[in-house]
Amino acid sequence: MHYHTQPTYLCLAHQREKIRSLEPLKAKIVTVNEDCSERVLAMRAEERHEISVLKKEKMNLLKLIDKKNEEKISLQCEVAKLRKSLAEEYLRYLTERDARKILIGDLNELRYQREDMSLAQSPGVWGEDPVKLTLALKMTRQDLTRTQMELNTMKANFGDVVPRRDFEMQEKTNMELQEQLESLRGDYEEVRKEHEMLLQLHMSTLKERDQFYNELQEIQRTSTPRPDWTKCESVIAGGQERWLVLAEGKNSDQLVDVLLEEIGMGLLREKDFFPGLGFGDSIPPFLRFDGPVKNKKPSKKEVVNLLKDAWKERVAEEQKESFPDFFFNFLERRFGVNEAMAWAYTIFENIKLFRSSEIMSQFYAVLMGKTLESVYINQKDTLFHLLKELINADTQNEGSITMEQFSTVLKTTFPLKKEEQIMELMEAAGWGPDSSNTDMLNYRSLFTEDEEGQSEPFVQKLWEQYNSEKEAYLEELKQELNMEPLEEVTLLKMRGTLMNIDPTMDRQTLSAYLSQAYQIPAIDVPLDDEERQGIISVTLETALDRLKMADTKRVGPREPEQAS
């Protein structure tokens, strides 16, 4: 055990001694390593510096090369310019040389001509007497002096005189200015008169304004407050909901009619019998009866359906009898002889009461002779024709068209309507400010009616425009005739006036209008007999009332060029 440990110790000691001896070598190696690293870093830094210097030198050389290239291009341009200038100078020198040769030739030619003239000249001319020449020069100078004096005299006498051409031009200008002055004087006189008329009109307008203001003050003082229509909700059968439906879109006057209808309908329901009106001549034939007549008390819908059936039968027959006789015969055929009178009184009282219903008011007007039945028939024909045109425009047969197509059909069907009227019809059909022309319209719904026979707003607007157009046409006829209402107008004058305000009117329509105004059969209207036309006459008021009863409307535009 002892022998084995001692060598190990010695070996360790030896190793430690050896390690201790190697420590300086390790430090030296570390030092050498650091020196080498520093040298490497220094060499790399030096190389980087050299590389940057070489790059800068390269950039400078590239710039120098570019500069040399630019100088080369500049020198090439300058050489080209100098070559061009040299060519121009060469051409100029050639031209100068040719011109010099030509001038030398001309000079030689002139020299030859002078020699020829000197040879051809008479030798006696050069030998003229100097005394004679001096005398001629003196006389010439005297003539020059005298001419100068005459010239100065002429300038003094006629210095302010203008040439005749300038005088005529000034005279023409003066005449034109004179004409313009006369024209301006006339215009000024007209403007002055117009100004005086405007002053008078202004004074009259001021008087009217003061008068209207006083009337307004009086009206404001005496006027009653607007009625509170909501009070009617508790009175009307159906309450608030039905009143809102009845009052929608109506003004005060129309609301009064609605209220009267509702009150009258209540009173009409309470009546069991109507008193007979007798057999007087003023009583319509279908109401001539003595004694009480039973009230059948039909609903409004039943009355409307009955009137529609009557119109259908009237349109289908030949219309030989008068409308009141047809009406009573229709009731006899429908309800029997014993019930016809009761239904006649019942329907008459209903249509007289419900003025807001289109079909009832129209039927009442025709029945009482206030309107001809042709007005109703022609209106229905117009609606049928319009519907037919809309169906033709619906090429896809979908039941709807665009608003642009609808506007085109309206303008084609009613060529005499103004643009504002077409827009009113489109708005009544549902076209609004936010709508576009490509919006689709269900055109069939425009011609439907509710259970009580009330039409859609579109058809109502058509009927409203028809009445306003008729009134405007008759008012234009009245203004053109320029007569008092009770003054008689001859058939000749009426015919001329109708042709004047409606020049495209055909002969048949003219005969129909004159026949209605003068109550003459259309076949007997003497269109070709001016003597008879001058004899037949009625008062203007009567003629206009008769034309208002009929389907009177404009046939074509007043001015022929408007047709295009």
Image (cartoon, helix red, strand yellow):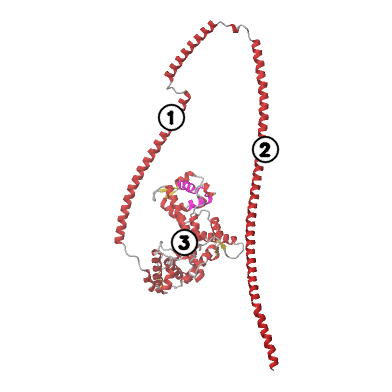
Task: Depth check: give the residue in front, 119 or 201.
Answer: 119
Q: Which residue is mark 3?
A: 366
The answer to if 493 sits in the magenta stretch is yes
On the question of residue 331 being in view, the answer is no
Query: Which labelled disc corresponds to residue 39?
Result: none
Q: Residues within 10 Å of mark 3 (few under 14, many from 20)?
A: some
Percent position (x, y) of residue 347? 45, 68
- Amino acid identity at mark 1: Asn
The answer to if 278 sits in the magenta stretch is no
Where is the N terminus found, in terms of image quarters?
Answer: bottom right
Task: Depth check: give the residue in front, 58 or 463.
Answer: 58
Magenta highlight range: 491-515
Separation of residues labelled 2 and 3 (CA atoms): 111 Å
Quarter assignment of residue 195:
top left
Q: Residues within 10 Å of mark 2 (few under 14, many from 20)?
A: few
Residue at image location 46% in from the left, 72% down from the top:
299
Mark 3, secondary structure of its residue: helix
- Say whether marks 3 and 1 touch (CB < 8 Å): no
Which numbered disc flags the more N-terminal residue, 3 or 1? 1
Q: Which residue is mark 2?
A: 83
